[in-house]
Amino acid sequence: MSKIKLTKGELKRQRDSLEQFLHYLPTLQLKKQQLQMKIVEARKLREEKKVALDRKVEEISRWTALLAETNADLKAWIVPESISLETMNIAGANIPIFKDIRFPQAEYDLYTTPLWVDRAIEELRLMVALFSEIAIVEKRIEVLQKELRITTQRVNLFEKIKIPECLENIRAIRIYLGDQQANAVGVSKVAKKKIMEYETEMVSA
């Protein structure tokens, strides 16, 4: 604990600091709870998307043989042109929210390309969209976890260091000022007694 001045002014400063810490601590604790809840929600969403992705990959695997037979380069049509995001503020953290994904227009010869290519492109695009959503949810979890670490550190700082430190400082100052007051009263009594003794001697003389 840092050395403090044992004065009435310092006592007021410590009391003001304690009041401030006690005022902000519940807000930090609530923020911590909100972040924890949002992380749980994001992890649940991530698992749901992963299940959907696994299902989609399994469906597409049935197309593998057909895809190998066509000369069409489907890669050019399943790479996103753009991915749109929104930003939402959750308990002070700006997190990304998946909004939309856009792909280039698929252009190919309708006479030489098999009819199932349209369906294959659609399914592959759904798979890519799921990959993108999972990546964005992962980023969301990362942002929330970082904010949770910072908030938890502040809660611990208030609960385990600042508030106990203020309480101990207040206790030490009050004890010191009490002792000083008691000493002053003692000195005053001795002085009063001496004066009375002196006055008695003067009267007797």
Image (spheres, rainbow, N blue to C red):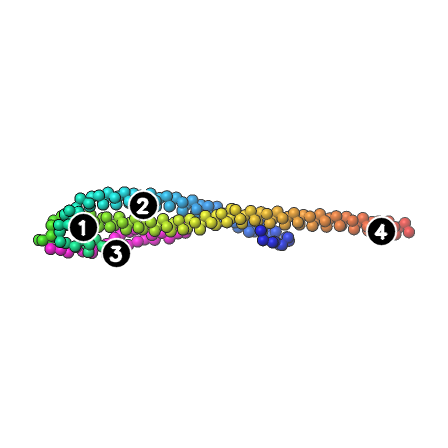
Residue holding disc 4:
198
Residue holding disc 1:
121
First in sequence, mark 4 or 2: give its number: 2
The percent coordinates of residue 94 (x first, y second) are 37, 53
Task: Judge whether residue 102 is colored magenta.
Answer: yes
Residue 104 in the figure: left or right of residue 148: left
Q: Residue furthest left?
A: 111
> Nearest the camera: 130 or 57?
57
> Nearest the camera: 18 or 123?
123
Q: Spatial distance from mark 4 to mark 2, Cα to Cα?
A: 91 Å
First in sequence, mark 3 or 2: give its number: 2
Mark 1 neighbour density, 10 Å: few (under 14) some (14–19) many (20 or more): some
Mark carried by residue 46: 2
Which quarter of the figure has residue 33?
top left
Which mark is nearer the camera, 3 or 4?
Answer: 3
Specify the segment rendered in magenta.
Answer: 80-109
Residue holding disc 3:
82
Mark 4 residue element: helix
Which mark is nearer the camera, 3 or 2?
Answer: 2
Q: Residue at x 63, y 50 (%)?
A: 173
Mark carried by residue 164: none
Q: Spatial distance from mark 4 to mark 1, Cα to Cα?
A: 113 Å
> Nearest the camera: 174 or 112?
112
Mark 3 residue element: strand
Name the kind of residue labelled 4 in the image. Tyr
First in sequence, mark 3 or 1: give its number: 3
The percent coordinates of residue 19 (x first, y second) are 54, 49
The percent coordinates of residue 90 (x first, y second) are 38, 49
Q: Residue at x 11, y 50 (%)?
A: 114
Mark 4 neighbour density, 10 Å: few (under 14) some (14–19) many (20 or more): few
Name the kind of residue labelled 2 in the image. Arg
Q: Spatial distance from mark 3 to mark 4, Cα to Cα?
A: 100 Å
